[in-house]
Image (cartoon, rainbow, N blue to C red):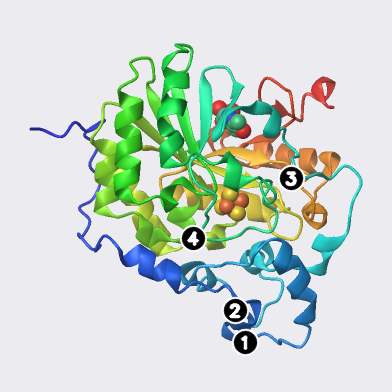
Amino acid sequence: METPVNTNVKLHKLPETDSQSCWKAEMAESFTRVEDLLDYLELPTDSLANYYEPARRFPFRVTRAYASRMKKGELNDPLLLQALPTIDELFDRLGYTADPVGDLQAIALPGLLHKYHGRVLLIVTGACAINCRYCFRREFPYSDGQLTHSRQAEALAYIAQDDSIAEVILSGGDPLMLDDNRLALLYDGIADIPHVRRVRIHTRLPVVLPSRITSGLVKAVTSTRLNTVVTIHANHANELDAEVGLALQRLRNVGLTLLNQSVLLKGVNDTVEALTTLSEILFEQGVLPYYLHLLDKANGTGHFDVNNPAASALHDDLQRLLPGYLVPRLVRETAGAPYKLNILKEKYLP
Ligand SMILES: *Cc1c(COP(=O)(O)O)cnc(C)c1O
Ligand code: SF4
């Protein structure tokens, strides 16, 4: 039987590398203790006590692949800042909550969020390969709220009875933490619903664990009538090294659409230089910038916030300097709103 492939775009021939499970072995070698990462980066470990409490509330985790792109000896490295717990996380701030974007009110079934017309979002796992300190789902109740295999049939039945749903978004956590068999089963179930046209995968793994993009994964997402959009998550050009480029190329070679979403983060990417370089490098790696999110005000993330006027000014600069297709949409996710709000339309500001 012939395997249906979405398009027949072929860029370059890539070597067949992967053994199917090497990404799991790599995951197992991740940094899970701050002191080990600091040692590796040749940074002092004398103020370690500062990390314990924040890392107890939201565990510390960084892959070796991601850490290898951090600059040694540089405490303000933009990649390190995204991953390193800090006592700033312990300060309560006005307006910061456990559920800043209204995920809980959008739950239609355990593991299924139905917030916007035509799209549902499945929380297929709570696991990630890296724990980003600014994560808006830091306190999401994954144990009750994820789509376990046993809940899958119920979610699919929900989608099947609403023919306005054309797109299923796989999210989490990171959906590519599922193994290829589970993904393939999920795809099969979704493909059986005639009105669903697309699957979108929201994943940081091509960036933080590029070895995850195995031929088995590529097969799982192409052996289907469904179109797949992969939305990666990179905030800084330094995250996109050659290895990431190759992983992305594997996805492009089979005709998948690749988009990126970033979060605007103080000290990480809140300069025109950082954001224009990010767009340029994304494009070179076959990815279009999609969203630049204003920080979702999750407890413990306030030190990353960039205020609206500063964000708008940066976005103006991007529009001035870049072609339109390399300018991400500057948005804020707002509980109860019918779409992600463009903050430049001030009349919609909460
Ligand atoms: C962001 C999001 C989507 C997708 O929104 P787009 O604007 O289509 O990218 C869908 N469902 C939920 C719950 C979301 O948070
Ligand atoms: S990869 Fe996404 S879901 Fe996971 S910790 Fe980072 S921001 Fe949160």
Q: Would you name the residue on which mark 3 appears?
A: 295
Residue type, label 1: Glu
Residue type, label 4: Val
Report whether residue 237 is seen. Answer: yes
Q: Is residue 290 left or right of residue 267?
A: left
User: Compared to 330, does 94 lie above or below?
Assistant: below
Q: What's the residue at 43%, 53% (across, down)? A: 177
Mark 4 CB lies closer than 8 A to ligand 2: yes
The residue furthest left is: 1
| Disc 1 residue crowd, few under 14, some 14–19, many 20+, Cα 10 Å | some
Q: Are marks 4 and 3 in contact (CB under 8 Å)?
A: no
* SS state under label 3: loop
| Disc 3 residue crowd, few under 14, some 14–19, many 20+, Cα 10 Å | many
Q: CA distance from mark 1 to mark 3?
A: 30 Å
Closer to the eye: label 3 or 2: 2
Q: CA distance from mark 1 to mark 4?
A: 21 Å
User: Compared to 308, does 306 lie above or below?
Assistant: below
* SS state under label 2: helix
The picture quadrant for ligand 1 comes to top right
Which label sits on residue 208?
Answer: 4
Q: CA distance from mark 3 to mark 2?
A: 26 Å
